[in-house]
Image (tube, rainbow, N blue to C red):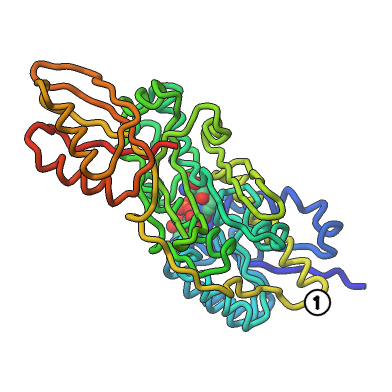
Amino acid sequence: MAKREIKAALLGLGTVGSGVYKLVHMQEPEMESKLGSTLQIKKVLVRNLEKAASKVEDPSVLTNSWQEILDDPEIELVIEVMGGIEPAGTYIRQALSSGRHVVTANKDLIAEQGLELTRLAQENEVDLLFEAAVAGGIPIIDPLKNSLSANHITEIMGIVNGTTNFILTKMTEEGMDFGPALEMAQQLGYAEADPTADVEGLDAGRKVAIMATLAFHTPVTFRDVYTEGISSISSKDIASASEIGRKIKLIGVAKETSGGVEVRVHPMMIPAEHPLANVSGSFNAVFVHGDAVDDVMFYGRGAGEMPTASAIMGDVFAAAKTLTRGMKGSTMDPCYRNLPIKKPEDMVSRYYLRMSVDDKPGVLATLASVLGNNGVSIQQLVQKVRKEDSAEIMLVTDLVKEYHLKDALLTFRAMSIVRSEPVVIRVL
Ligand code: NAP
Ligand code: HSE
């Protein structure tokens, strides 16, 4: 039988695209045994041809014309690792509509238009695969779609951004400042093109939306996710966390509750002995709770060239096998429910507050009564630094609905005895 050669186009040759290109070549000797066919990257789309020339064996594969790829009838598979909503969204829609399988790492796009694109893939009987869009090299999308599909999943919680976990680890373990730690994460290829998406929790929010949609079979987009980032976390808060036996991590949560789907990303002080507290550097970890399986934890590198290329290539191999067997794609719309999304104000947490206040008699009693009047009970209160006529206080509340805490904070902001904007971090 004639050897089948699958021809693919790679859109993007940055951190992830270069990793994919390398891994295709590394896997070449085993490709036929694994897939029953070989795989050739026939075209690579970039903006700057000159910059990309040294990254490929044969620069004639490079193009800056998407139309050239779309018009090539030999290309059966499109691997999108450019990032951003547009033009990536248009290219993916055109690829799916013209019967190509698509593999993408693009969480920005999947978290906004994933359902629409999935339906388009289903209509055209092709695959749309996006394992690399969540938690880099960790297999989590396929388990949610397949291995755990016999479960009613009620909770997902984890660390799903490598850049912020790297920064927090450097700040906690080496006392490094935020800026230099972010620069290192950028140099190592962990950060997004605009790292604001990482440090402000948007990237993790997109991943939470994607996982929640698959886990709860209900449409959840990035706009539904409450997000807070790590840019205001200071060494003082890291030290306070340590004093109460905790570490600060950027945590993503997706929960099915009686009040609807709760989806959020924010920094959290978690007990030092909690398994997520010891997930360091660019590693990510995701807990999933299902009614049959109980708890499962997925752990691995959440960002970077080769771990992300590994996730992409797993999907590429799956699509290539479908093509080799002459089968149609098996994309299915995951959403058969339409649960409401819970408002952030209704979510319940314990909180750490740090603020600078007047150092005079009665101040602590006044603050305590504001909290008490809003139904916020104090678990722990410590006066930290005293300087001239001010003092810094740190307190931890009991569990409270967010809107009660917000009311108390509004009152604090209007009080002259409160000298600084309170720093607020959730506590597990
Ligand atoms: P990157 O290093 O910035 O690379 C982007 C590549 O896409 C570059 O080669 C760029 O070409 C090309 N490109 C961008 N816009 C283009 C356009 N309009 N037309 C043609 N080419 C275009 O990004 P990356 O870190 O590899 O990330 C790529 C995707 O993977 C993103 O969706 C990201 O969220 C996702 N992802 C990244 C990681 C990671 O660890 N980095 C992990 C998981 C998922 P030029 O250089 O010529 O502009
Ligand atoms: N910027 C992302 C991160 C890449 O740091 O996790 C992986 O999705």
Where residue 372 sits, quadrant-wise, is top left
Query: Relative to 407, does residue 174 appear above or below in the rendering?
Result: above
Ligand 1 lies under 8 Å from the Cβ of mark 1: no
Residue 14 can be seen, yes or no? no
Query: Relative to 142, does residue 277 appear above or below in the rendering?
Result: above
Q: Residue at x 47, y 75 (%)?
A: 90
Q: Residue at x 65, y 51 (%)?
A: 139
Q: How many marks?
A: 1
Secondary structure at badge 1 equals: loop
In the rendered image, which residue does mark 1 sit on?
Answer: 326
Quadrant where the C terminus is found in the figure: top left
Q: 10 Å neighbourhood of mark 1: few (<14), some, or many (≥20)?
A: few
Q: Position of residue 165 (x, y in %)?
A: 47, 37
Hey, what amino acid is under mark 1? Answer: Gly
Q: Nearer the viewer, residue 77 or 124?
A: 124
Quadrant where the N terminus is found in the figure: bottom right
Where residue 360 sits, quadrant-wise, is top left
Residue 55 can be seen, yes or no? yes
Q: Residue at x 55, y 58 (%)?
A: 211
Q: Nearer the viewer, residue 418 or 179?
A: 418
Q: Position of residue 116 (x, y in %)?
A: 51, 76
- Asked whether, in this view, residue 58 is left or right of residue 93, the answer is right
